[in-house]
Image (cartoon, rainbow, N blue to C red):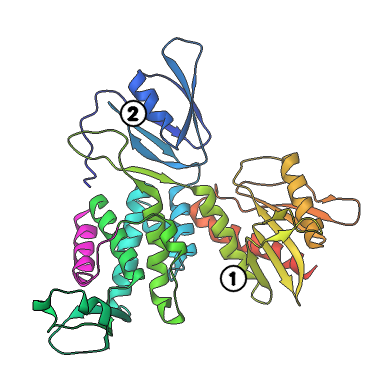
Amino acid sequence: MSAVPQVWTRPPLVLREAERLDAALDPAEVAALRACPLVDVAPAWTPGHYTLTARALVGRAALPRRWLAVQPKTPVPNLFAMLAATARLPRWSDALTAHSGGDDLLAGLVHLYAAALADYLAGGPRRATVDMVEAAPVVRGKLLLAPTLRQSPSLRHRPITRRGAWSLDTPAHRLLKQAARIAQGLALTDAVHRGLDVSLARLVDVADVDTAEDAFDRLTLSRLDGPALPALNLARWLVAGVTPTLAAGRRLFPAFCFDVGHLFEAFVAHLVTDGLSDARVTAQRHTPLDRDQRVWLRPDLVVTRAGRPVVVLDTKYKLAATPDTPDLYQLATYCQALGVTHGVLVYPAPATTPPLVLQGGVTLHSLSLDLGVSPAALPAACAAFVEAMRCLAQG
């Protein structure tokens, strides 16, 4: 896939997250935009005009005669820092300045992944035992009698066997190679492109696959796969975010869709898990609402001490000045189902709402992890959020 776009004849459509834009669109553009996950499209009062409303996603996509871009409302260096932290790259705070030269999110993600993959491969990729089925003049391993007898008589002197062998061709390496091939087509600098060429050469014995994001959920890793986790975490964002172009042309323009809300949720989980090292933090814990267990809840995070839940968190990627009533109802339900006295709504913007004390002693808090601060101020904002959570967990 080439990152060089085709020649556009109309000015681009550029929005920020949750922003609205009225634009004159032709029928082909309307059809393409309605197939795009980045925006909602509705007719405007003026004939031939439409109102585009950006969703809580960022990215870009090709239209028949121009391109659409939805930009983040969060400073891009802060997004890089969250990516590096959730991927568990060493010294994640370095990412605050590593991409401050104007790189867009896609270029920065490719840069981070190329570096993480190179670091992993330089340390010696882990080989694993895989089953090899082969036909050979001698029996090496377990004889597969039925497949051998099904061969034509002229080939039965070559028994089919299965044996274990050490190989780089593991499911994890296949996913890393898939993401590397995607990144290679998107690399915007010669240095990153050359680095990916070297990494792909080291993975030459790994099979090429084209899988969806859920392949990462099915991946089974052991403790020995720890060095590959940073690269695998970033590979998942690439595979999930890069999709085929929405319009045909002489050159392919990559459509890119990035869920910043999901990244914010993962970043909060990372900070709470690392910051409350003396407690147990469970993500997406299934909890029954009723005694008969017919209705189940799944709060974002539950903090447990001595086997007892003490705090439940619900992450909201909204720029709300005050909590929405449905969010408060949802959090109160979590607290009741888990039997905790502290519930926390986490917002990516300043929160000044005082705690809300409910009947029965449950207190609902609104905490801020302000992503709109300058990159230099982000570590302090993270530290303040973790300290507030530590106080609530000690309760």
Classify 10 Å Cα crowding around label 2: few (below 14), some (14-19), many (20 and above): some
Residue occupied by mark 1: 274
Q: Position of residue 185 (x, y in %)?
A: 23, 51
- Above or below, 248 against 211 in this view is above
- Above or below, 294 against 168 in this view is above
Q: Position of residue 391 (x, y in %)?
A: 75, 66
Query: Sequence order check: which comes first, mark 1 or mark 2?
Result: 2
Residue occupied by mark 2: 12
- Above or below, 114 against 277 in this view is above
Query: What residue occupies the far right of the structure in this picture?
Result: 360
Give the left or right position of residue 237, taking residue 337 as reference.
left
> Picture quarter containing residue 247?
top left
Which residue is rendered at x = 68% and y = 40% of the image?
321
The secondary structure that dominates the magenta segment is helix
Label 1 to label 2: alpha-carbon separation = 42 Å
Classify 10 Å Cα crowding around label 1: few (below 14), some (14-19), many (20 and above): few
Numbered tag placed on residue 362 in the rendering: none
